[in-house]
Image: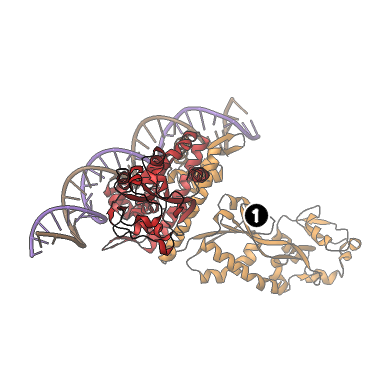
Chain colours: A red, B orange, C brown, D purple
Amino acid sequence: MALNLYQLKAFFTVAQTRNFTEASKRLYLTQSAVSHAVNKLGKSAGDELFNKTSKGLELTEAGRILYKACETVFFEIEKAEEHLAAVKNKNLGLIRLGATVEFGTTLLVKYLKVFIEKNPRIHIDFQFRHELLKPLLNEELDVIIDCTEHDSGELLKTPLFREEYAVIASPGYLRKHRIRQPADLAGHNILSMDKEGKWWGNFLNALPAAGRPELSPVTEMNHIRAMINAAIEDLGVGFVPRYCVMKELKAKTLAEVFPRLKLFEGNFYIYQKAKRAGLERHRSLVEYLKNIKSTHLERA
Amino acid sequence: MALNLYQLKAFFTVAQTRNFTEASKRLYLTQSAVSHAVNKLGKSAGDELFNKTSKGLELTEAGRILYKACETVFFEIEKAEEHLAAVKNKNLGLIRLGATVEFGTTLLVKYLKVFIEKNPRIHIDFQFRHELLKPLLNEELDVIIDCTEHDSGELLKTPLFREEYAVIASPGYLRKHRIRQPADLAGHNILSMDKEGKWWGNFLNALPAAGRPELSPVTEMNHIRAMINAAIEDLGVGFVPRYCVMKELKAKTLAEVFPRLKLFEGNFYIYQKAKRAGLERHRSLVEYLKNIKSTHLERA
DNA sequence: GAATACTATGAATTATACTAATCTTCCGCG
DNA sequence: CGCGGAAGATTAGTATAATTCATAGTATTC
């Protein structure tokens, strides 16, 4: 039978992307090459590897068997390459690190400055996007930092820190309108990621049922940064992760409306694909991030 | 870098055999092809893979790294192939089963008759030799049955049964010379695998220190079968694993000299290479052999 | 110091991976 | 219904890599 690495690689990438054309791009090959490779592999495996359904490709049983083998085979090869590089003092490889746009651009880059300096032989590609899980699972990304909860046997989850929120407004806005307690928010212009006010849900939940204000009017903004800028421009009161506005709070272009209210919303986690966790470079990055946690919490 | 399966296979086989020429034979390639492949692999790994010493090849550090990767990679591929074959109702592969000549030819073949009938899709190659461990370690054999003790992290050891010995002579010989207790052996012609009588050591050890006879004269035979035939031909008294002479005892061409003495010598074990244990076909063979144990003990 | 047993090398050959162009199939949509 | 577009398959030719053949090199042994 003699399985073949080129073919397995092509198959594996197609299986991950569920798309021959996309896979061919990742492999820097033509779609034709990938098609040939997968077909040959199918022949030597004695079976079709994919079923073509109306909504795309799906693995057959033979395909699933090969997929599992590919996971360990390619991981093992990658590990060996990293290990060889370490022995030869070569570059230790690439980490494609995913994070949300806000977190990535504000804090992550800053946090990783030291790591990058200390580990010149590890290369990091930053990928700031909103969709993180899918790219992780299809191995477009190696490590992601996300504040949504994912639980799956496929994932290795490392808690990072709790995300703290803050109600913010410009100092000028606050001088004009005295807001001393949550109930005072009624009638103020509310800046939210949605019209329905779900975005503010966690703020309301943190209050006793009696003292919850009626939030209206609501101005919708589909981007955190827009909300922040709107608040700076005196447009109203926003509700944002505190890390997003650390700089503004310090520069006093924004102020916290209820500085003594602690508002937590979920946790930040580092996620890795379980089958691929174990590369030395991933381990050292995760270790570094875990240690930085305390520093962050002090400032927050 | 992009490691390559052909090259890895060549390298892996050379590493196992410590010999390019031998490896090329196993791979059904020329020595030149193997040499080319290993050199290319060395180049893409950025380092030599073997050191040539006075007594052969030895792996460099880079070589050891790659060797480890190869172990899992090729095992994973083999497992996938077996699994695919199972799904497709194809042959489930080959087990190269090693055993000592005596045990293999007398008992093993008989024992495995049922297994072979029940598992027509598993092919077994019997290899009866005296040297078993080395071929197992360099993967010339998949499973061996051996009565010597080996302990190594590389090996998976499954106890099979205890080997029972018997003192034998032809019925005619026993009629002529009355031998009722071990002390009576003094002066009889002793058939042994060695001149020094180490072969009989376990017999002597089973006796109280007082009643140990002087064993001489000793006739040396370098083969169990020769010893058995010599005993049949009235040449003297032999000391052999009982399973070797079950047939002769039944046919009454040989008789036990001390039928009530139980003489154990070591255990039979099934050995597998730990890194390669886990193939379904190996598992089912080992399982089958373990179950047959009781049957054997009843008869013994 | 010849004989033996290995491994390395370079050019030639063979196999196979890859591409470009073309074709088929399957949807969605006016 | 038919047209256009998207995605994969097919075919034939090219490029690349694997393998061989022939030969040379290098220890080791007697």
Indicate the position of residue A192 as horizontal and vertical percent values: 32, 53
Query: Which residue sits at x=56%, y=35%?
Result: B51
Q: Quadrant of residue B160?
A: bottom right
User: Is any part of residue B32 visible from this angle?
Assistant: no
Report the number of discs. 1
Query: Which residue sits at x=53%, y=46%?
Result: B68
> In this rendering, is residue B30 above or below B130?
above
Indicate the position of residue A273 as horizontal and vertical percent values: 44, 52
Q: Is residue B205 left or right of residue A77?
A: right
Which amino acid type is marked by label 1?
His
> In this rendering, is residue B160 above or below A72?
below
Callout 1: helix, strand or loop? loop
**Which residue lies most toward the right here?**
B210
Quadrant location, the N terminus of chain A: bottom left
Q: Closest to the observer: B32 or A88?
A: A88
Q: Is residue B57 left or right of residue D2?
A: right
Q: Residues within 10 Å of mark 1 (few under 14, many from 20)?
A: few
Q: Closest to the observer: C6 or A150?
A: A150
> In this rendering, is residue B13 above or below A51?
above
Q: Mark 1 points at which residue?
A: B130
Q: What's the chain of the residue with tag 1? A: B
User: Is any part of residue A181 visible from this angle?
Assistant: yes
Q: Quadrant of residue C21?
A: top left
Q: Is residue B241 left or right of residue B270?
A: right
Query: Which residue sits at x=35%, y=56%?
Result: A199
Indicate the position of residue B254 as horizontal and vertical percent values: 75, 70
